[in-house]
Image (cartoon, rainbow, N blue to C red):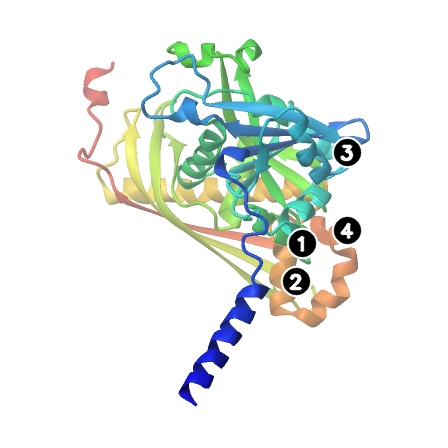
Amino acid sequence: MERLQLIGKLAVVTGLLLTLTGCWGRHELNDLAIVLGLGVDQAGDEIKVTAQVVIPSGVSSNQNKISAAPVTVFNATAPTLFEAIRKLTVSSPRIAFLSHIRVLVFGEQFAREKGIGEVLDGMMRDPRVRPDYYVTVARRTTAESVLSVLSMLEKIPADKLYKSLDASATTWAPTTTVNADRLMEDMIGPGHSAVVAGVEIRGNRGGINSNNNLTGVKPEAQLVMNGLGVFRKDKLIGWLSEVESKGYNYIRDQVDSTMGHIRCEEDKGYIALNTLRSNTKIKTTMNAQSKPQFHVKVETVSVIASVECKQRIGSMDAITAMEKKGSEQTNKLMREAVNTVFRKYKVDIFGFGQELEHKYPKQWAKLKDNWEEQLKDLNIQYDTKFMIKRVGTLDDSFLKQIKE
């Protein structure tokens, strides 16, 4: 009896093994081209894809030759994104492997004219592509050009872009990071439009795709984060300046730390302030006429980084006066950002509509169809509590004693 039971179990196990298909989609590592940066440009009515692929020997620790490029780029053009990606094999000896993408770069012309929605939809639909890569727009240039610039500190340019965005977003208020998940939510969410960080090429454009970028003290061409691109639905419609980008990030509670300044009272110098942390809350209410009101409340904590003038800072009265200036300046940043976006672009990138929907869904249902027309008349109040906790290791600056 036991023998029959054992035979029966073996038969079941054998049957189950026959149903297993194994790794049907398996590829050998040597057959794959690891793509870390993907660029999308316009090519007439088609899509031009640029893939920045790692060259293993170029990033190997035992590779001492500076002339060995760490990456190469391949291009292909087709009517759809994944046709172009598959078509890369015409010039690449390996199959493009997209699971490790760090940055997705759109050319400015493509973002303005075609829109980024269809490409994002394709990328999000592919289960092999993780949506944690950063999305950016190549400002005044193409995605292909951006992905062709070699960098000094980071061997892989796509890695450089990713880390530059990360570092800048946490230490410099005008910059922000947007991954694919958040970008999709911003584009389809009610009462909210998307923004994407811009990257541009500065310096000698002859340095693009040149090893001269790796052999000199100063690179011929550099990739620089510059401004935030404003979108209506999935199309780029304009750019925020550095000041406006800073105001936007304060309203969106996306300022971790940053550096700024206020003017001195006695002369034309500046007092540099290092913002250690910032917190923003938006309170939404309805007035007697059933119109929405928004109260943007910001709390920041800063320390004095430098005093480039003769102003005395060692007293509580001086600290209070500086805190008042800092509050007024932060309020001005936010107000100018809102006025520019609402009057020039007529979209809500700040999420006021989103706040209204969460707090007053019935009122939002009545207002949402004409929300963009109502933006310029919104009642928004700004209130910044600007706190200076430390003045550094010096009280008053010694500049007054050494300058006439």
Q: Are marks 1 and 2 in contact (CB under 8 Å)?
A: yes
- CA distance for labels 1 and 4: 10 Å
Residue 63 is drawn in which quadrant? top left
Position of residue 287 measured from the top left corner of the image (x, y, whole percent): 65, 67
Q: Earlier in the sequence, mark 3 or mark 2?
A: 3
Give the answer, above or below, for where 10 lies relative to 276. below
Check disc 2: other Cα within 10 Å, few if <14, some if 14-19, many if 20+.
Answer: many
Which residue, given by chain and number where applicable, does mark 4 sit on?
Answer: 373
Label 3 residue SS: helix
Check disc 3: other Cα within 10 Å, few if <14, some if 14-19, many if 20+.
Answer: few
Q: Earlier in the sequence, mark 3 or mark 4?
A: 3
Q: Are marks 3 and 1 in contact (CB under 8 Å)?
A: no
- Is residue 346 shown to the viewer in this render? no
Q: Earlier in the sequence, mark 1 or mark 4?
A: 4
- CA distance for labels 4 and 2: 14 Å
- Taking the image as shown, residue 240 lies to the left or right of residue 395, namely right
Which residue, given by chain and number where applicable, does mark 1 sit on?
Answer: 378
Looking at the rendered structure, the kind of residue marked 2 is: Pro
Q: Nearer the viewer, mark 1 or mark 4?
A: 4
Which residue, given by chain and number where applicable, does mark 3 sit on?
Answer: 113
**Dividing the image into 4 quarters, which one contains the N terminus?**
bottom left
Residue 2 is drawn in which quadrant? bottom left
* Residue at 42% across, 84% down: 3
Label 2 residue SS: strand
